[in-house]
Amino acid sequence: MSWGHQVKQLITLNWREKIISLVLAFLFWFMIKAQDARHTPAYPMPPTVRMPVPSTPAPPQLTPVIPPPVQVPSELEPTLSPPGATTTPPVKPKEAIGGAAGL
């Protein structure tokens, strides 16, 4: 047998099974590619480079400075007290029921 006849027999023998296996391989490749393209990590990845730890503390000139609180003029202070600060006069139970019923 010549090598040309062997190649022809290799291709034509069980050709249906070979075509089905090619189609399945393509479908699996396509599904894996589509899944990989839309995959996003559920959490952010940690940085790979670590920040160096300072060996000496920062000088006092570099410490943060907090400005002093600003005095608010009396015209801008709220005129209403907070909701929990005021108390309403106690209402007698009979008056509350009569007022609610409209009698």
Image (spheres, rainbow, N blue to C red):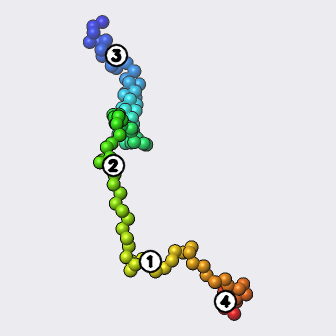
Identify the residue at image location x=39%, y=35%.
32
Q: Secondary structure at mark 1?
A: loop
Q: Is residue 8 left or right of residue 35?
A: left
Residue 63: numbered disc: 2
Mark nearer the viewer, 1 or 2: 2
Disc 4 packing (10 Å; few <14; some 14–19; many ≥20): few
Marks 2 & 4, CB-CB < 8 Å contact: no
Q: CA distance from mark 3 to mark 1?
A: 93 Å
Name the amino acid, label 2. Answer: Thr
The residue identified by callout 1 is 78
Identify the residue at image location x=57%, y=73%.
84
Q: CA distance from mark 2 to mark 4?
A: 63 Å
Taking 93 as reference, is 8 above or below it?
A: above
Q: CA distance from mark 3 to mark 2?
A: 80 Å
Disc 1 packing (10 Å; few <14; some 14–19; many ≥20): few
Furthest-top residue in view?
1
Furthest-front residue in view?
60
The residue identified by callout 4 is 99
User: Which numbered disc flags the more N-terminal residue, 3 or 1?
Assistant: 3
The residue identified by callout 3 is 10
Mark nearer the viewer, 3 or 2: 2
Residue 48 in percent (x, y) is at: 35, 34
Residue 10 in percent (x, y) is at: 34, 16
Mark nearer the viewer, 3 or 1: 1
